[in-house]
Image (cartoon, grey):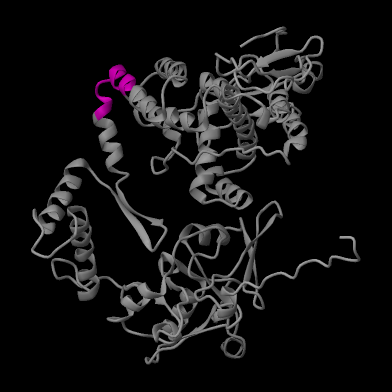
Amino acid sequence: MTVLLAEPVVTRSPERGRIPTDAIPASLDMPAEAGSIAPSASATPSLAPLAASLRSGPSRATISPVASPPSAPAPAAFDLPSSTSLASLPAPALVWADSGRGARPGASPTVPTGARVVDLGAVEDFPLPGIDVAQLVAMLGSVPVAEVSGAALVNGVAVWQQAVNMIQAAQAAWVRELEARTPDALRHVPDELACALVSTKRHAENLFLRSWGAAQHPALADAWASGAVDARKVDVILDEVRRGGGSLSDGEVAAVVADAVDKAGTMTGPQLTRHVRTTLIAADPAVSERRRVVERERRGVFLELAPDAMARLIAYLPAAEATAAFTAIDALAGHAAADGDTRTVDQRRADAFADVFTSVLDRQATPDGSPLPTRHGQRVALQVSVAATTLLGLDDRPAHLGSYGPIPAQVARELAQDATWRRVLTDPVTGQVCSVGTAAYRPGADLTRTVMARDVTCTFPGCRQPATRCEIDHRIPYDFARSPEQQVHDPQTCEANLHALCKHHHQAKTEGWWTVHHDPATGVSWWTDRHGITYARHPVRVLVPPDALHHRATSPPPLGDPPF
């Protein structure tokens, strides 16, 4: 890297007090999806003012733990005098150059007096030291990517990653301020972030915990703010320290974090995980047993959806139980394929694994013969919605598999061969369920079945909890003071006033953190948070209307009078 002029940039970091890591619930997983920023030529002119706003935020930042004991000290705060605000700090202009092979001659801009030159064709140190994020983004946005050398492109991607890291660290400061203003923030702030970012609650929780956790370790927070580590490695360090550093002193934890930050630039995420884990075990040999006990509490089974009517069933188990399960599945699959069996050993294992559970559903009994528990008074079974015309082979419209989503018509036909059929009425325009028929006279069960079939999932924006595992809630709270005559003429427990909510979002609505309004004409549920921001949850189509599968060609624009 060639530097013509490097003026010192004054930086100030808030004093951060370390909060005990056990304040983070053990049930939450720190590794998260890493965000990214993808620049484009059309967006380049707006990048510089957008990045400049990162330096002009509030002059006061408060860091507060999610949960702390009564004797914990007050959150630390810091003030920046107006004369040294971030927006007015001196920083030389950044200008790019390219000395790499293949660069177009004359592509590099003219270097103004006093500017700092970053040679993208010969960058050796990453991250670039003493860099201001706004000027870094502005410099990168001015590079004509089609005219620079291959070395400059590779180095430019690395420098863009530094900018992404710095911006994500700046975003974390906003999340921490939101946390500091919200009582019981861990329960409520992730819901607000999930709606605002149109993401899952899990992703929002990870963003929240990453923002809070980094502030408890000054070395990590400073490295993230300078772009030296990315969000993924921040998660790795926080997760390992949270699990294995509970018995260490503050000084020991600080030493582990500082060592991890120092090694992060030369290690991948998995390599850094093993390094931090080894360091923690060396600091306290008994930590491995404590970690084993903690991890055992996190055991579980998870369904991960995949394309093409496939899914992954992931079991997180203690090593002994996982090995025992695999040994049994391997035995069921057989060590050699029977004559005429063309399946691979992996395919035979998968089929043997699935047969265990399909037989449980078919018999409605556990392996020891006990009856399978019911849910909402109904037997547990797969729910498949498919058009009658599709079952008859008259068309190939997609079907819908409960807890999964759309599946091809042929898969639905195969499932329907041994199934019990139930009539379902859908709106011909929207494809939304209107009612569910049954041969039995059970109004309570019928209404529950209708609501679950209509809503498909929890009706909070972005929540994917299947309706069959949700609670049935009154949109307008049930009024027990109403007379029986009023209930008859204007019932509260009716399809129009019921919706499916998972336990978490049901509780949040009951406690007043969210209000909901439903539009019966469109099926849209409007959710408003405590700040007055409203989000829409649109109805789920269980069947695709036939006209939705046909795309009309747009008419060409009129050419006008010649010459064209």
> Who is closer to the viewer here, 304 or 335?
335
Range of magenta residues:
278-288
Count of numbered tags: 0
Can see residue 142? yes
Residue 315, horizontal then vertical, whole percent? 28, 50
Residue 438, horizontal then vertical, whole percent? 40, 89
> Who is closer to the viewer here, 473 or 40?
40
> Who is closer to the viewer here, 164 or 423?
164
Dominant SS of magenta comes to helix
Report the side of 335 relative to 398 (left or right).
left
**Which image quarter is the N terminus in?**
top right
Name the image quarter holding residue 522: bottom right
On screen, 95 above or below 530? Answer: above
Residue 122, horizontal then vertical, whole percent? 59, 14
> Who is closer to the viewer here, 183 or 25?
25
Which residue is at 20% across, 70% downward? 359
Residue 142, horizontal then vertical, whole percent? 73, 28
In magenta segment, residue 561: no
Which residue is at 48% across, 66% downward? 457
Can see residue 479? no
On screen, 212 above or below 533? Answer: above
On screen, 506 above or below 4? Answer: below
